[in-house]
Each structure stands twice: as C-alpha cells, then as structure tokens.
Image (tube, rainbow, N blue to C red):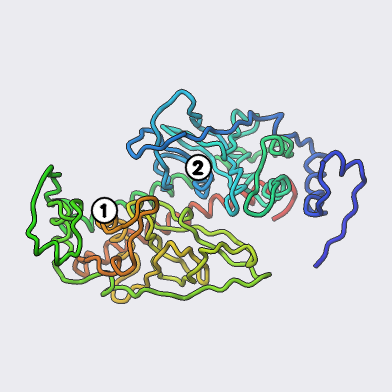
Amino acid sequence: MAVWNSVDIGTVLEADRIDGDYFKPQDLEAIRTIKAAGGRELGSIAKILTGRTPSDYADDGSLAVVRSGNLVAPLIYPTCGRPFLKAQPARDRVRLNRGDVLISSIGMGSIGKISLVIDPTDLITVSEVTVLRNAKVPAEFLFAYLASPTGQSQIEREVTGATGQQHLLKSKVARMLIPNVPDGIDKPLRDAVQGAYERQEAARLAYAKAEALLESTLGLDKLDLTPRLFYERPYADVQTATRFDAEYFQPRMQNLIAAMSRTGQTIGDVAKLSKRRFKPKAGSEFHYIEIGDVSGNGTADSNPIAGEDAPSRATWIVKPGDIITTTVRPIRRLSAIITEEQSGHVCSSGFAVLTPKDIAPELLLVYLRLPLVCELLDVHTTASMYPAIAIADLMKIPISLPKDATRQKIVTKVRQSFNARRGARRLLGEARVMVETAILGKS
C-alpha cells in the first residue's frame, strides 16, 4: 500500500536526498519526537571511527579480527562463538575497547547490524565496521537504541548505494539523532545485557561439556596424534584410497580414521542428504542463511531478502531438525541445527543439508563439529582458493557413536546450551523494547 507524504524543499536540500524512503512519515514523526525531547546528533556525543583492514591474515595470529559479518553476534567478546579470522599485531591495528558499540557499515544482509563489545581482549576491527566510542550516554543504552526498530529505521534512512553495493558512511552515522536517556533505565539495561552475557557463557560451557563427553567416549582424546616427518604405506593402500597425498596417509590421520570406523557406519548411514530446491519469486521475501551466518556454537542466523534480490547461491530449503554443514573449508567447524522458527528458510549451496535418520540432530551436530572430525573433512577437500569437500566424500566419512545413555547426556547438554542462548536473546529483546517504550511510549 502506498504511503503519501510531503516535505518542504528546504528539508530536501538540507538532507541532500529526494528518495521517498528517506521521508517516511513514521520515521519523521519518531525523529521529531526525539528532537523535541532534547535528542542529540550521534556525532556530538560519541567518537566515531572505523577500523583498518589487515593487509594479510594469519592462521596463527594472536589477534581476532571482528568483521562486519561477525556482528550477527549482538555481544562481542573472544569466546562469543563467531568464526573470527586471525592477524598478527601491527602498529596500524584498530583495537577495540570495552563498551564500544559497533555498526556494520557495508554488505547486503549485514549492514546496520549492531554489537556491543563486552570483553575487548585481543580484538581488532576492519574498515567496514564503524566504532562508537566514549559515548556520553551508557553504552548499553546506545546499543539497545540502535538495535531497536526506531534506531534501525534511522540507520536504514542513512544507507546509500545500490543493492549489493550499499554503504553507511561515518558522516551519515554522525547525524543520526540519539534520545536522552530516560530516568531509571540505566540499571535495568545493564542487568539485561549482563544477564544475556552470562547466559551465553553458560550456553558455551554446556556445549563444551557435550563435545568433551563425545570425544572421551569415542576415545578420541587418547589417540596417538603425534606428527611424523616421514612415513610409508603399501601401494595397495594408495590404490584402495584412490589418492596419494601425504596428508591423508600420515599416521595421525590413519589412527583417527581407524578410531572412527569401528562400527563400520558412515554419515550416509545415519543421515539423508536433502535436496529441497528453492526457486525465488519476485515480490516474495525469504530468509537466507549464508556461511557467514553460522556461529561457532552450532546455531545459524538468517536475513530477509526480497525474491528479486536472491543471491545465485540461495539453493536449499531447510526444515526443523536438519543439520547444515559447510562443504567449503570444513576446518572452520561451521555446522548448525535448524530450529522450528527457521522452517522454510533457504541456505546457500555451500552447505550440505543433512536430515538425521536414526540419530538425534544434536548428536550429529556435535559429531560434525568435533575438531578432529573437521580435520578429517578438510583432508578430503580439493582446490586451493576455495577448498571444498565433495558431497559423495562427505557422506562416506566414518562415524562412531556412543551408547544410548551417553547419547542422551550429550543431547541434554546441547539442549541446555540452546535454551540458555534463547534466554540471552530474550533478554536483549526486552532491552530493545524497554528503550523503545521509554522514548516513544510504544510497547
């Protein structure tokens, strides 16, 4: 339905914009309300800077690089579950501070994402991330406001560029209006953010216990994984494996394969490869899960995208209980379980969609994310720029499973982890509503 609005020419010239989206009536009304209550431009109450992208990354780097795609996580700290790239220290690195509020300033689907830095230890950031520092309002308030519907509307107004090449410039961020902090809101906001952080850490620890239990039950923690400088194998083994690369035949990898092959089962025996192909339709929105949306804790986020803007890799429809696992660089441990809320979402062709048959989804998830299993998957990759494992090889990966009682313990731990994360999301949602209600009287 069309919405009509009129503005005077002076307002248009001052804004240097003539597009209708910039002058939506509801957005202008919210801005007037904030301004009338003493709201100030963001540039007057906070230092605004951008990061610096490293010229090169290093797997053994001591610094974690926070990029725009990592801002899917609302709270940023070293163990927040995002797959940070690594870099070595250098004089030009932009280190993060506790209380920094981060805005993703580029990228369709990620632009406008907001995060709050809880623990900045060894964290740096890149040029596509805008950093709000030393604000004259509490960091929790600034974070919650910018993540609220009103704050997001202001951010969306200031995004420039065409689809696929959108940007949020520092100059545009600086002119966004920030409300005065309502009385009595400081402590509830701090409590909500702290509570969310504590629940996320509880979730991380619960999942780590599930992983450790599976590793110890399978005896993977006692394997001889000592690296060898040289070794030999019979030619018959090379013929059987139909490969002759040294990495595959190193003793530590063969010991791992033997331990995982005790039952004779493979991934294909316990899960079906699902191929529900997606066909985008113009005018019909869908939720897209790309590789960057998968966290380091077995969950995945998504972004709404119009059918006409569907990426070419938007391929597979997912259903609750599916496990999506990346076939590109599997060493990154990027697998996730699909929740009830994500039924009908669409994932990238860079994922294999596995529907468990005689195994709990949570157990398959933990198995696929075990570091040693991911190392084995990585050995089966081909190509150098974008190493990927073939689907046929993925389905032949051996799998060894514990007894039923241990399986249930693992599943319980994973569910505890997911429940804690839902609690964290609930608290952060309440914080956004708290701010929205206080400044505009909305609920």
Q: Which element type, helix, strand or loop, lies under badge 1? A: helix
**Which residue is at the front of the view, 348 or 426?**
348
Asked whether residue 437 appears in the rendered view, the answer is no
**163, above or below 346, in the image:** above
Question: For the point 32% across and 52% down, which residue is it?
Answer: 331
Residue 166 placement (x, y as % from top left): 65, 48
Tell me where residue 299 appears, x and y as whole percent: 43, 58
Give 245 or 300, whichever is nearer the viewer.
Answer: 245
The numbered dot on residue 67 is 2
User: Would residue 2 be found to the left or right of residue 248 on screen?
Assistant: right
Q: Quadrant of the N terminus?
A: bottom right
For label 1, the residue is 375
Of callouts 1 and 2, which one flags the residue occurring earlier in the amino acid sequence?
A: 2
Q: Is residue 146 left or right of residue 243?
A: right
Rate crowding at label 2 as few (under 14), some (14 to 19) or many (20 or more) other CA atoms within 10 Å.
many
Q: Is residue 80 visible?
A: yes
**Residue 38 at x, y percent in the picture:** 79, 35
Residue shown at 28%/66% (left/top)?
A: 393
Q: In which image quadrant can residue 142 be found?
A: top right
State the mark number for residue 130. none
Which amino acid, mark 2? Answer: Arg
Q: Is residue 16 above or below residue 340?
A: above
Residue at the spot 71% in from the left edge and 35% down from the top edge? 171
Task: Please give the name of the residue rendered at 48% of the width and 70% of the height, measured from the top-left corner.
Answer: 316
Q: CA distance from mark 1 to mark 2?
A: 25 Å
Task: Indicate left or right for 299 with 434 as reference.
Answer: left
**x and y percentages locating residue 301 in the rendered image:** 50, 57
Q: Is residue 427 above or below residue 237?
A: above
Report the amino acid beneath label 1. Answer: Glu
Q: Toward which corner of the image does residue 241 lie, by quadrant?
A: bottom left
